[in-house]
Image (cartoon, rainbow, N blue to C red):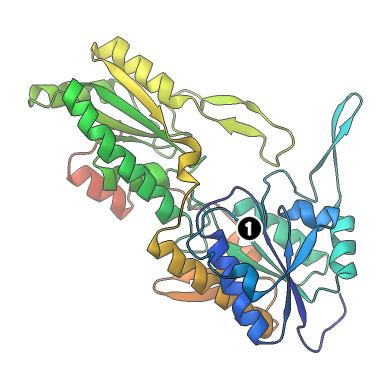
Amino acid sequence: MSAIRKIRRIGVLTGGGDCPGLNAVIRGVTKPAQDLGMTVFGIMDGFEGLVEGKARELRNADVSGILARGGTILGSSNKGDPFHWPVQKDDGIEIMDKSAQAVKNYEAWNLDALIAIGGDGTMHICNKLSQLGLNVIGVPKTIDNDLDATDLTFGHDSAIYVVSMALDRLHTTASSHHRVIVCEVMGRYAGWIALNGGLSGGADIILIPEMPFSWEKVYDKIKQRELMGKKFSLVAVSEGARALGEEMTTKGQDIKRTDPVRLGGIGEVVARNIEKNTGRETRVTVLGHLQRGGSPTPFDRILSTKFGAYAIDLVSRKKFGYMVALKGSDIKPVRIVDAILKQKLVQPDTQAVFAAKSVGISFGTE
């Protein structure tokens, strides 16, 4: 793109899976942008809208009252990667590169900058679009909290709140019926939701991808609790968790997605094995998309608003190719290329793991 003298028109989109806080970011972008005299275009359905040319102007009235609303008023998609675009053919699906069309629409709308709100996949796309000359700013969103360059992503706090509340409710029914109840949560390859949700919800066992577990250790924990007079147990298991020497449990593949693996089903496997090998009546609850829906927590509302406002600040200063990030209590810019170097995974020596072990929670490893 040619050099620009003043930022007049910006686009904003929400890519990847939805989560609480997206609308708060859109609001945090639109209000200060208009105060600075910028026109804001909301691109519909994530990067699909950038490729297919779907956008509408956003005004103050469009973002009024959406701070606490879940989801995204713009729509989203985790199958709209311009560099991995699925096209239906007679003999199946063909993956094509539609990035040139994305650039064409960016130019046709006369955009001076693009703010893309999303997770790891969205930031990878942002990096590629930057290399094609687009002026891009990233805003980190994912309930999984697996972006390494920011201390937290918005959406994570809301997700673990759901997990915590679910475990609170499962606790009463598990204790009443003297059952083991397994709660499967999202997170893909990162165990942050299971770890933080399990810690806040009082799980007795937490199983995460980064710490492959021993079946015998899981059974032993349940039996030890019964010897202590505790006739029930709660198990929080991440969808990507696996036993030592075993593969992750999957539901198949979706080649329309950049990462085609569909995780899920480990909760049923864990419940079945516990009941078979301990004789304890066991049930499973899969929270699924409950973790993605509903209103954002106050923490996520504040963080999302800060992210949106800071993204506009970066745009106004023409600091492109950066992602906004939470560092301690401050919002700071990090280069998108640095933000995607590696995923932020749970380390066995992290303080949350230490705290969990200190209060008697087992990870099936000891």
Toward the viewer: 156 or 339? Answer: 156
Which quarter shows the N terminus?
Answer: bottom right
Picture coordinates of residue 224, whole percent (x, y): 14, 24
Q: In the rendered view, does 134 fall on the left or right side of 294?
A: right
Q: In the rendered view, does 254 fall on the left or right side of 163?
A: right
Query: Which amino acid, mark 1?
Result: Ile
Q: How many marks?
A: 1
Q: Residue furthest bottom?
A: 5
Q: Could you tell me if residue 298 is visible in this image?
A: yes
Residue occupying image coordinates x 77% and y 51%: 48
Picture coordinates of residue 143, whole percent (x, y): 49, 50
Quarter of the figure with residue 177: top left
Q: Could you tell me if residue 348 is visible in this image?
A: no
Residue occupying image coordinates x 81% and y 57%: 54
Which quarter shows the C terminus?
Answer: top left
Residue occupying image coordinates x 58% and y 24%: 251
Tell me: residue 301, above or below residue 242.
below
How packed mark 1 is, by other alpha carbons closer than 10 Å (few <14, some 14-19, many 20 or more), is some
- Residue bearing mark 1: 73
